[in-house]
Image (tube, rainbow, N blue to C red):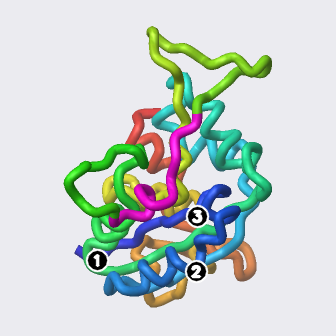
Amino acid sequence: MKELSLVLIKPDGVELSLTGEILSHLDMLDIILVGSKVVKPNIELLKNHYFEHRNKPFFNDIINYMMGKYHNFNFIYAFCYYGEDACTKIRDLAGKTNPMDKDGRKKITTIRQKYGKNVIVTDDNGNEIIIKGHTLVRFENVIHASYSDKAEYEVKLWFNPSEIVEDYRLYEWKKESGENLVWTKGYLALRKEIFGE
């Protein structure tokens, strides 16, 4: 199935100068880059992006992480890719969410395994945050890649139609006042469909 996928290079990926390497790997996947930009994400954007995790104990920490509060850069690179099974191909390259989730008998091949790390989350006083007897850990995993079932929501959240090459805009769009392009069904409508809110 032809689909679009959102890819984000997170602040740790920017800080580690991994953009070129990640793009080189993505370029070999038989998918096409159809949109790109630099984004300094605000709280509203990130709360919508991580909406499904809004009631989890790591929610605020992941927002701070994505805003660059733990790194030297407060921006990220956002990309939109198009292709057959694009989401699966990109997620296979990115690897598991937890970068330390590795099979000891296999080579390290994913981006997250190579460059990700786990960081213990602390409160404002520097104390470890313990949830149900376990230390809370932040996955600093360099890259975000859409799951197929959330790709349309994420693409529409991060990109407007004019930022994607016209021939590859899989979702319906229209012109609003003047030359402004908008999605016919926006990310808020999709959020309600996907998450029920």
Seen in the picture, residue 80 relative to 152 is either above or below; the reply is below
Between tags 3 and 2, which lies in front? 2
Q: Earlier in the sequence, mark 2 or mark 1?
A: 1
Q: Earlier in the sequence, mark 3 or mark 1?
A: 1
Residue 16: give x, y in percent of width and height: 65, 64
Residue 86: give x, y in percent of width and height: 33, 73
- Which residue position is annotated with label 2? 20
Q: Secondary structure at mark 3?
A: strand
The crowding category of the residue bearing disc 1, from other C-alpha atoms within 10 Å (few below 14, some 14 to 19, many at least 20), is few
Residue 73: give x, y in percent of width and height: 77, 58
Q: Residues at badges 2 and 1 in contact (C-beta under 8 Å)?
A: no
- Which residue position is annotated with label 3? 9
Report the span colored magenta: 109-119
Q: Is residue 46 left or right of residue 3?
A: right
Of residue 102 and residue 180, the one placed in the foreground of this image is 102
Q: For the N terminus, which image quadrant? A: bottom left
Q: Residue furthest bottom?
A: 167
- Which residue position is annotated with label 1? 2
Between tags 3 and 1, which lies in front? 3
The crowding category of the residue bearing disc 2, from other C-alpha atoms within 10 Å (few below 14, some 14 to 19, many at least 20), is few
Residue 183: give x, y in percent of width and height: 54, 67
Decide if residue 107 is in sight here.
Answer: yes
Q: Secondary structure at mark 2?
A: helix
Seen in the picture, residue 27 relative to 51 is either above or below; the reply is below
Of residue 6 and residue 124, the one placed in the foreground of this image is 124
Q: Earlier in the sequence, mark 3 or mark 2?
A: 3
Q: Secondary structure at mark 1?
A: strand
Determine which quarter of the picture holds residue 38. bottom right
